[in-house]
Amino acid sequence: MKKIITVFCFAFCSTAAFSQQDPQFSQYMNNKLFMNPAYAGMRQALCVTTLGRQQWQGFDGSPKSLVFSADYFAPAIKGGIGINILSDKLGFESNLAYRLNYSLHVPLGGGVLGIGLELGALSKRLGPTGTASWLATSTWQNDQAIPPQLKQTIFDFGFGLWYQRQNLWCGLSSTHLPAGTMSGNSSAIGFPPVSFPLTYQIARHYFITGGYNWNINGGDWELRPSFLAKSDATITSVDLNVTALFNQRFWVGASYRFQDAIVPMVGFMLPNSKATSNEMPGGGLKIGFAYDYTTSNLKSYNDGSFELMINYCMPIVIPPRRQGHGDVRIFD
């Protein structure tokens, strides 16, 4: 019973930090495609990113999130395409989401404006689940107060705008625009059987982000301040970050998430030789690590949050168009 009470307290206390349904990632600047479909293809490369997060380590039933993202610059369609696959688990809730992205690139004001759309599906499972805690025990099956699992999949789509010019970038996006509802009935095991109507409302989420890459000390150092504001129109969370990059190889930075966490982070790059963008000249491999030190009321009940990011980009070289002649007689 004590553990059950703890989990319910966790569910309610988490609203003081970030209670939106979309998972939270501290290294948002290293996977912009996840929050904005208009970012697809902006690096003019084929890029693959995996980002994993273990939130509130030591808290039974704490959030565990893993996202795989990939995008490709396709000049033939005047933009970029991408995909996001998300696995997100939190207590009794488990989510699996698939999103296909397209971004139309439009030259604007010396930069590029991306107009993006994402289409996909969201599969949600509600009910006792788990493998390494009391959630995995069978005793709950005899408790009529706990219904069995409910599974449902719904259509989902989102929209975004992205603009970047030299060292400046910013974006505005929204996910779960249909704001769909998942509902159903389930019956707990026992006699007499008990029927439970379950309804889950998917909330629209809104993201505003921006940043600037500032070259200092003759170009060996680069300072990258950025921010991310995210909201479901009920709860709003704001991240402020400053990252220093040395010699296009190593970076160290820190974020502050209001009323939630202080987040130091480190990482390194192994660039390729061909330049693609000021985000990562030449593409190549990036590995980053972040640790969230909780500052909210939950700090006494967990050991912080851990996040690992792995990214690889392969530059896309567009060969110049060959000038031909329609009539061979000009060679006479």
Image (tube, rainbow, N blue to C red):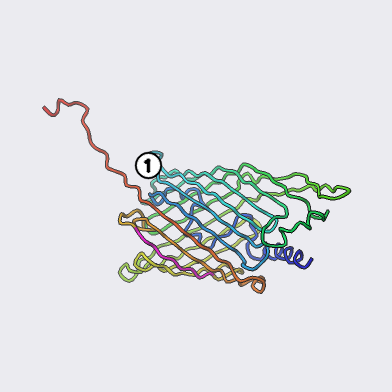
Dominant SS type (magenta)? strand
Classify mark 1: helix, strand or loop.
helix
In the drawing, does residue 92 fall left or right of residue 326? right
Q: Residue at x 40, y 53 (%)?
A: 313
Looking at the image, which is closer to me, 257 or 152?
152
In the drawing, does residue 217 fall left or right of residue 21? left
Q: Which residue is drawn at 66% across and 74% down?
A: 300
Give amino acid for label 1.
Pro
Q: Which of the 4 image quadrants contains residue 183?
A: top right
Give coordinates of residue 82: x percent, y percent: 47, 46
Q: Disc 1 marks which residue? A: 75
Seen in the picture, residue 70 relative to 241 is either above or below; the reply is above
Quarter that holds the N terminus? bottom right
Seen in the picture, residue 67 relative to 222 is either above or below; the reply is above
Quarter that holds the C terminus? top left
Looking at the image, which is closer to me, 238 or 148?
148
Looking at the image, which is closer to me, 254 or 3?
3
Q: Does the magenta stretch include residue 269?
A: yes
Looking at the image, which is closer to me, 178 or 130?
130
Q: What stretch is highlighted in magenta?
A: 263-271
Give coordinates of residue 97: x percent, y percent: 59, 48
Q: Is residue 287 magenta?
A: no
Bin the neighbour count of mark 1 within 10 Å (Cα to Cα): few under 14, some 14-19, many 20 and up.
few
Q: Which of the 4 image quadrants contains residue 15?
A: bottom right
Give coordinates of residue 12: x percent, y percent: 71, 63
Q: Which of the 4 image quadrants contains residue 54?
A: bottom right
In the displayed image of the protein, which residue is found farthest to the bottom?
300
Q: Which residue is drawn at 50% across and 70% down?
A: 264
In the displayed image of the protein, which residue is found farthest to the front?
138
